[in-house]
Structures are given as structure tokens and as C-alpha cells.
């Protein structure tokens, strides 16, 4: 059994916690550096993709688990954004950057380059060779359309403040209209270089321009040329834009499971493309190497994403039906079963940028709101939550490096964690203190037996066990802990405030400012309606600076205020588990929500 763990030294990262605020989501389940030591494997020296040198694409298929069905070529709508969809699409759609194993922003030099000309002006240059698989060059037109999908309102205007009704159903809403009202600028529709002029400094400027979809396909489908589509965006031509939005929103939906559309509708700009007849509904999606890809050649001819649930993945790995797995919600049983497979597999474990937490409901009438039990009630609860026991019993058996997490915007394996936590948290809730909790409960004025409904998405055995541990401790204080796990928690209870404490996780990658959407007033994902002027001001300072030192200092302020007012209680970074056939090289665990397929184009069979 080869066992690799994501080391804290390799995983050091200066950037912040979560992926795009509008794109990150509370996780109902759970969502490593290293590679096989077999011959042919290349050991990476950092968090980005390894330099494999000259690669010749080898015949054969590598099979990886991917639990959900494919449902769109356009994975950027609010209805289609999914880590499972992205696992496939990211192999087909290029970008200027990707997230490394620890959230580091890595550059894809084969795609192009970008440069900050000033604090608010960024110039992008596409590779002269960057081309869609149908032979059409990747150009400014693709990125102008990408901007339009995040900027044009339903009444055909550029967004003023990102609050209007959007024309395109982009998962990020109208953010780019707010940031860049003039849109990207270039000399011509087919230009390989374009410039973004931002209205203000943005801490996350490096990741605002992501994958773009083919503008020439949209143009053809609505009966105009690419140049005419570009002109229509510049001139806000309602007739053309409404048709473009209708296709962009719905034309790439794969609503006939097992039936891939005409390849002309789904060209690739990445190392892989849909294989002909490569979709078996409810079973698998197969990608094949893109013969016209100009970047590093994919190491293996085909990748097959097999739709196998977590509870069947280990058996499938043992049978050879899968080569790579990343079980969702790994437990100690998961580790035991993988280790039982012996030297035929390589096991990788480590902390991830997904973190578990307990959030209080601050809405009027809630027992933890400031007009009811207030801070004293929240302190009483925090003093009785057995955080160390939860980590020791439920997480360390999966990842021995796991620790109780004492921050929200930095992770225990990141290099600024100790600096931020030492300045913001004094350890007052490290250990259970029933006597102190009882005193705070009395101070709060709550009645003995006050119910605390802990809501989470059920079924989830780990969270059920977490609630049981909290109940065993906090019922001694005077609370009556109620397990309110529900199959509709994210659809109903969380958004409606139908809980006292919410138990879930945020998924992350490398965005610096995504927490602003969670803790600020009124953040779109601030479900408990917490509001604090100090926190709001710190986020404003942080988000309008590109200086990492400023980010760290503001994180200290934010974290201290969130602890002092008890927004909620962080628990732990989720453990990640990846297992792969020992015959497959270059499989690397990642801490980000991109999942194990983040470098799948580098996987290859050992010779």
C-alpha cells in the first residue's frame, strides 16, 4: 500500500479561502499532493501541474469515478454549475489559469498570458495557436461574449450595480457589468489581445476572467456572423442579444441523456473532446484526445468518467472497473477498505479547502439573536460544543493531520494560519467547559430546556454523529439539542431561517474575497442575517486591495470580530481521500473543489 499525504509545507498558500462567492455552495456531503512512485511518474515540485516534458499520447483508457450525470456543455449557468459537470468540461475548455493543489493560482502558458498594466487595467494575450477543435481561433469575440453574459441586464443595458435582472443565466450574475461596465477592449473581433479596465481595484483580479464558450457557435445558431455578434454586444442590439441569450442559456443543455449533440455545437479548446458515441446514459462519459490541441499532449488517449456512487467505488477500483476514485464523505471504514487492497492501489489523504462549521441564526425571534439570548447564549453553546472530540472521533481516523480549525478565511495548512489565528482567537472555546457554559446560559435569560434545532442535509452519518456529540455535552448546560437533519435543508430550511444552528460546509479553492458574501451585510450567502460594521469595513478594505499584507491584516480583524461576536463556530477542514490503481502515474490529490481530475490530462499508465 502506497500512502501519500498532502504536506503542510507543500500546501502553503498566501491567497484566501473560497472559490467564487456566486459559485461556491454549501455542501451536503463531503467533498493531497503526490503521485505514484512507479516508473514513469514525475514528482511535482509545487502545487501546479508537473512538467512532464515531451509527452506522446498513449493508447488506452483511464477510468475515474464521477457521481452525477452530465447535463450541459455550458457549465456556467446557475442551473448547470456543478463540480461533477466541471470535472468533465474543464478537460475540454481552456483558461488563462487554474487552481493548484492548495488553491494557488497557476498560469496556463499554453493558453496565453495576462499582465496587470496598472491597479485597474489588465491586458490578456491569447496564444496564436489557441484554436477550437473545429479550426476556429479562440479570440476576443469569445471573451467579449463571456463578459456580456455577466453584464447585460434583461432590459438590454449594462448593469449598474449587479442587482438588476440578468439577460443571461450566468452563475455569477451581473458582476462583470459592475466591475467593467465598458467591457473588454480590442482592435477587432478576431484579435488575440484584449484589455479589461476595471472601475476599481479588485483583490481577485487574477481569477475574474475564466473559461470562455465559443462565440462563433452562438453566432451561427442565431443566424449572424461572429463580427455581427460582437457589434451587437457593443451596440446593445436587443434583437441579437435576446437570441444569443436564449441559445447560451438553453442551447447547450444535454437534455437527452446518452445522446451527445452535433460536435459542431460543442467544440473543444482543451486537451480532450467528447468521444463519438461517448455517452452512455446513467453509466459513463468518455473523452478522447483532441488531435488539434496545441498545448502539452494528453498522456492517455481516452478518459472515461464512470457514474458510480461513493459506496461502490472501492469495489469498482478493486475489480478494475475504475482506476481513480475520490469517495465522497470518507470515513475510517473507507480507509480500512482501501488499505485492504494492498499494493495494487495508492492511497492519498490530506486536508481540503472544504470546511465544516456551525452557524447561528441571527434573525429576529431566534434564541441566539441579539434581541433574545444574544451573545451570552451563543457563548454558552460554543463552550459546550466538543470540537476536539468531534475531530478526534470523526476526522482523525481518516486524516491523521486533521486539527480543530480556528479560522474561516485561512486553513490550518496555509502559511498565514498561525499569524491570523494568534491575532484573532485566544483559545477560549478549545475545550468544553460546562460550568462556564452554564453561567453564560443563566446570563442569557433562556429557560431550562430551550430547544436548539441543529439543521443539516440528511442523510449524513458524520453530521448525525456530530449532532449526537453536541447533544451529549450541551444538554448538560440547559439546552435541549434537537437533531433537525432534513432532506430539504438547503432547498427550504437554510434559506428560510428555519433552524437555530446550521451545520454544513463551504467548498473552496483560491478566491480571496468569497467570504464577503457570507459575513457581510447583506451578503447573498449570509443565511443567518449576521450584520457587523467592523466586519463590513474590513471586507471593503480587503476586497479593494491587491496587497497580500493588507489581506492578512484585514483577515485578522474579520476573524477576531467573528470570534468576539460569535458569528458561528468553525470545526475542521474536511479530509480528502484519493485512491488510484498503482499502475496509473501522476494522480494527485488536491485540496480544492476541482477534485482529483484537476490534472487528469497528465494521468498515464506505467510502462
Image: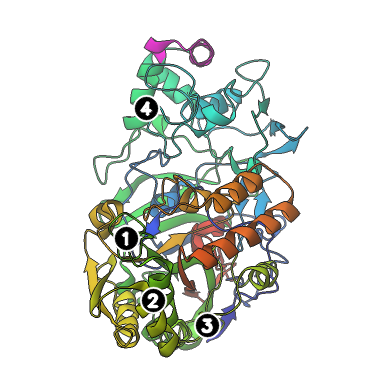
User: Where 493 falls versus 327 (above or below)?
Assistant: above
**Image location (x, y in percent) of residue 436:** 44, 85
Q: Nearer the viewer, mark 4 or mark 2?
A: 2
User: Where 378 falls versus 105 (above or below)?
Assistant: below
Circle 3 residue: 430
Q: Earlier in the sequence, mark 4 or mark 3?
A: 4
Report if the CB atoms under discs 1 and 3 are less than 8 Å apart.
Answer: no
Q: Nearer the viewer, mark 1 or mark 3?
A: 3
Q: Residue at x 69, y 58 (%)?
A: 552
Give the SS element for disc 4: loop
Give the SS element for disc 2: helix
Determine the CA span between mark 4 and mark 3.
45 Å
Circle 4 residue: 165
Circle 2 residue: 443
Q: Which portion, as a residue range, is magenta?
A: 226-240
Q: Nearer the viewer, mark 1 or mark 4?
A: 4
Q: Earlier in the sequence, mark 1 or mark 3?
A: 1
Circle 1 residue: 307
Q: Earlier in the sequence, mark 2 or mark 1?
A: 1
Determine the CA span between mark 4 and mark 2.
46 Å
**Image location (x, y in percent) of residue 534:** 58, 52
Q: Nearer the viewer, mark 2 or mark 1?
A: 2
Q: Is residue 125 left or right of residue 324?
A: right
Residue 489 appears in the rendering? yes
Determine the CA span between mark 1 and mark 3.
41 Å
Amino acid at each position: 500500500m502506497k500512502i501519500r499525504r498532502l504536506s503542510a509545507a507543500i500546501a502553503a498558500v498566501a491567497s484566501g479561502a473560497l472559490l467564487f462567492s456566486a459559485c461556491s455552495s454549501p455542501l451536503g456531503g463531503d467533498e493531497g499532493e503526490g503521485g505514484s512512485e512507479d516508473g514513469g511518474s514525475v514528482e511535482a515540485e509545487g502545487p501546479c501541474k508537473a512538467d512532464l516534458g515531451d509527452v506522446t499520447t498513449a493508447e488506452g483508457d483511464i477510468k475515474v469515478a464521477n457521481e452525477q450525470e452530465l447535463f450541459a456543455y455550458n457549465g456556467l449557468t446557475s442551473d448547470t454549475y456543478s463540480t461533477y459537470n466541471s470535472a468533465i468540461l474543464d478537460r475540454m475548455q481552456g483558461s488563462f489559469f487554474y487552481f493548484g493543489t492548495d488553491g494557488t493560482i497557476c498560469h496556463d502558458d499554453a493558453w496565453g498570458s495576462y499582465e496587470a498594466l496598472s491597479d485597474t487595467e489588465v491586458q490578456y494575450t491569447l496564444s496564436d495557436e489557441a484554436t477550437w477543435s473545429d479550426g476556429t481561433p479562440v479570440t476576443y469575440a469569445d471573451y467579449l461574449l463571456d463578459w456580456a453574459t455577466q453584464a447585460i441586464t434583461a432590459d438590454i443595458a449594462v448593469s449598474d450595480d449587479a442587482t438588476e435582472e440578468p439577460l443571461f443565466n450566468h452563475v455569477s450574475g451581473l458582476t462583470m457589468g459592475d466591475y467593467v461596465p465598458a467591457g473588454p477592449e480590442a482592435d477587432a473581433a478576431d484579435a488575440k489581445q484584449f484589455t479589461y479596465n476595471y472601475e476599481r481595484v479588485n483583490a481577485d483580479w487574477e481569477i475574474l476572467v475564466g473559461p470562455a464558450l465559443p462565440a462563433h457557435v452562438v453566432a451561427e445558431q442565431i443566424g449572424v456572423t461572429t463580427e455581427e455578434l460582437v457589434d451587437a454586444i457593443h451596440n446593445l442590439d436587443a434583437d441579437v442579444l435576446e437570441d444569443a441569450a436564449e441559445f447560451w442559456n438553453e442551447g447547450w443543455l444535454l437534455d437527452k441523456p446518452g445522446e451527445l449533440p452535433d460536435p459542431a455545437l460543442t467544440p473543444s479548446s482543451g486537451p480532450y473532446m467528447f468521444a463519438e458515441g461517448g455517452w452512455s446514459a446513467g453509466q459513463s462519459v468518455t473523452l478522447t484526445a483532441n488531435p488539434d490541441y496545441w498545448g502539452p499532449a494528453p498522456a492517455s488517449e481516452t478518459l472515461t468518467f464512470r457514474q458510480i456512487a461513493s459506496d461502490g467505488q472501492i469495489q469498482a477500483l478493486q475489480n478494475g472497473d475504475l482506476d481513480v476514485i475520490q469517495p465522497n464523505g470518507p470515513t475510517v471504514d473507507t480507509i480500512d477498505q482501501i488499505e485492504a487492497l494492498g499494493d495494487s492501489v495508492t492511497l492519498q489523504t490530506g486536508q481540503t479547502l472544504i470546511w465544516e462549521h456551525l452557524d447561528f441564526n441571527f434573525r429576529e425571534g431566534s434564541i441566539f439573536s441579539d434581541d433574545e439570548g444574544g451573545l451570552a447564549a451563543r457563548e454558552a453553546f460554543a463552550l459546550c460544543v466538543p470540537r476536539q472530540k468531534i475531530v478526534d472521533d470523526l476526522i482523525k481516523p481518516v486524516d491523521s493531520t486533521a486539527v480543530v480549525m480556528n479560522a474561516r478565511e485561512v486553513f490550518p495548512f496555509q502559511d498565514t494560519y498561525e499569524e491570523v489565528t494568534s491575532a484573532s482567537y485566544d483559545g477560549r472555546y478549545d475545550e468544553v467547559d460546562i460550568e462556564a457554559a452554564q453561567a453564560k446560559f443563566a446570563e442569557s435569560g433562556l429557560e431550562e430546556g430551550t430547544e436548539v434545532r441543529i439543521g443539516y442535509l440528511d442523510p449524513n452519518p458524520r453530521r448525525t454523529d456530530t449532532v449526537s456529540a453536541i447533544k451529549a455535552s450541551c444538554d448538560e448546560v440547559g439546552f435541549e439539542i434537537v437533531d433537525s437533519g432534513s432532506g430539504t435543508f438547503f432547498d427550504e430550511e437554510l434559506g428560510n431561517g428555519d433552524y437555530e444552528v446550521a451545520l454544513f460546509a463551504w467548498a473552496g479553492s483560491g478566491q480571496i474575497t468569497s467570504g464577503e458574501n457570507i459575513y457581510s451585510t447583506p451578503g447573498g450567502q449570509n443565511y443567518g442575517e449576521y450584520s457587523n460594521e467592523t466586519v463590513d469595513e474590513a471586507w471593503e478594505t480587503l476586497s479593494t486591495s491587491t496587497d497580500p499584507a493588507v489581506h492578512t491584516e484585514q483577515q485578522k480583524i474579520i476573524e477576531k470580530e467573528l470570534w468576539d461576536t460569535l458569528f458561528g463556530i468553525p470545526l475542521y477542514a474536511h479530509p480528502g481521500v484519493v485512491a488510484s490503481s498503482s499502475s496509473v502515474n501522476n494522480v494527485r490529490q488536491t485540496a480544492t473543489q476541482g477534485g482529483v481530475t484537476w490534472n487528469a490530462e497528465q494521468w498515464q499508465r506505467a510502462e
